[in-house]
Image: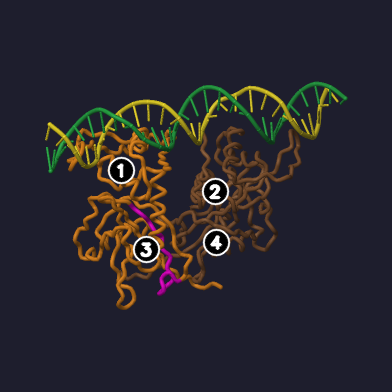
Chain colours: A brown, B orange, C yellow, D green
Amino acid sequence: MTNIQNIRVAVDAIVFGYQNNQLYVLLIQQKFGTEELYWALPGGLVQNDEALQDAVKRELKEETNVTVNYFEQLFTFGDDIKRDPRNRVISVAYFALVDPSKLTIKADSDADHAQWFKIKEVPPLAFDHNNILKKAIERLKAKLTYEPVGFDLLAKEFLFSELENLYCTILEKEIDRRNFRKKILSFEIIEETDQYAPSKSGRPAKLFKFNKLKYNKLTKKGFHFEIKFA
Amino acid sequence: MTNIQNIRVAVDAIVFGYQNNQLYVLLIQQKFGTEELYWALPGGLVQNDEALQDAVKRELKEETNVTVNYFEQLFTFGDDIKRDPRNRVISVAYFALVDPSKLTIKADSDADHAQWFKIKEVPPLAFDHNNILKKAIERLKAKLTYEPVGFDLLAKEFLFSELENLYCTILEKEIDRRNFRKKILSFEIIEETDQYAPSKSGRPAKLFKFNKLKYNKLTKKGFHFEIKFA
DNA sequence: TATATTTGTGTAAATCTTACGCATTTAGAA
DNA sequence: TTCTAAATGCGTAAGATTTACACAAATATA
């Protein structure tokens, strides 16, 4: 009855990026078993005196040289006892959104094996990582509609069309450009800058930026961000 | 560097019930340390060959003699290294909703120490369990607004006024009775029965029941349950 | 028989969403 | 230089939803 527990605790990171109308996820190449090479989510075992949050940040930094401030806990995968065929391992998955400046990986001893993949071109991953990724995408889609997380995936200053395309691409839906703009502007959480973006063709577009402070204030007053689509 | 990992994995159950316009949570009395007695959430260590889901169900059954079919994963608590002062323990918390028939605890050797508490009268709990409970309540509130989970807390056949009071009580908001009824009925996921409830005073009320099958069908077609309040 | 109490239904005004049209500003082709 | 294509920015009318209320119906009890 008083069997000693022998379960390992791991963390995995799903880090999303966005560029050129494409959603990306950060993967690492991992040796699994003797010879087979698999792509996998960054992650690893938690240390005894380490908060789960800190463990993800550390592993991500070690394996990809990418630093992320905010991770949100996604889900803990531990129902499948053989999800890692070597040992019983449960994994607490975290996801993060990074802006385009982080999409080029800085050279590093370990980071050589890290790479950004277009979400539609993700190969079969190690363990149950395809499954974890799927859940993360679902969460991202949901969050886009009820929290202003799209801005986390864009540069500080962005075009309205970029924001609009981000929603279209990730949610895989058509959006009426004019109604979308009106809706977002009505929230009064983004501001015009006096900058214009260099345009390849067509009328030059204003750059906007997200006012997080104002968003937080409004939220305290009961404001709720929400974008719905037909 | 290759330190052996020494982290225990536990599960905790937050089980909610509802009766007489009151939200209840199921707690157990737990010996902690040498003499102090604390109330705590049901739960315990996961076995080596046991799915997390199965672990919660088992612990709940063992400690309270309550059986629950569906648990939803709430959150994994593992950032505070000293949340259990004896060992490093991370806990995967699950929550469940039960109907009023389960609110009377069946006598059992271990279940003697189990008890339903009104949510407003929960004492200081062991470990970080007050914190876990807080998070569970937040989730319940959120879910009430975007999924038809209220019905899980009511008997199979219920009065409209019961449903309405459930929303008022748990969300701590006022609702316009007539608009609420209209809104819920417009979803076409609940049905009149030909039963009437015994009334103490006033016009007798029809009993309704939730048509889960129809809800599932509608959901597949893109229907989305949602109740908002001014 | 009158009163208190709770249920059941309706409707008008206000707000929000949806579906569009069109002028504006630029780059590049003719 | 002028014309065209491409993208931005703004507006408006019709439709749908939400909100705020009022009143009739059915019962138990005094």
Cα distance between the residues tagged 3 and 4: 23 Å
The residue nearer to you, when weighing D29 against B147, is D29
Q: What chain is tagged by disc 2?
A: A
Q: Which image quarter holds the N terminus of chain B? A: bottom right
B15 lies above or below A3: above
Evaluate if marks 2 and 4 touch, with contact meaning CB atoms under 8 Å apart: no
Q: What chain is tagged by disc 1?
A: B
Q: Which residue is mark 3?
A: B46
Please name the amino acid that badge 2 sits on: Pro
The residue nearer to you, when weighing B116 against B51, is B116
- Helix, strand or loop at label 3? It is loop
Q: What chain is tagged by disc 3?
A: B
Cα distance between the residues tagged 1 and 4: 42 Å
Q: Closer to the observer: label 2 or label 4?
A: 4
Residue B58 in sight here: yes
Where residue B7 appears, as percent x and y from the top left, is 44, 69
The residue nearer to you, when weighing D16 against A2, is D16
Residue at the location (25% across, 63% down)?
Answer: B114
- Mark earlier in primary sequence (2, 4): 4
Cα distance between the residues tagged 2 and 1: 46 Å
Question: Is residue B228 magenta-colored?
Answer: no
Q: Which residue is mark 4?
A: A56
Q: Are marks 3 and 2 on the same chain?
A: no
Which circle marks residue B163 in the picture? 1
Cα distance between the residues tagged 3 and 2: 30 Å
C23 lies above or below B50: above
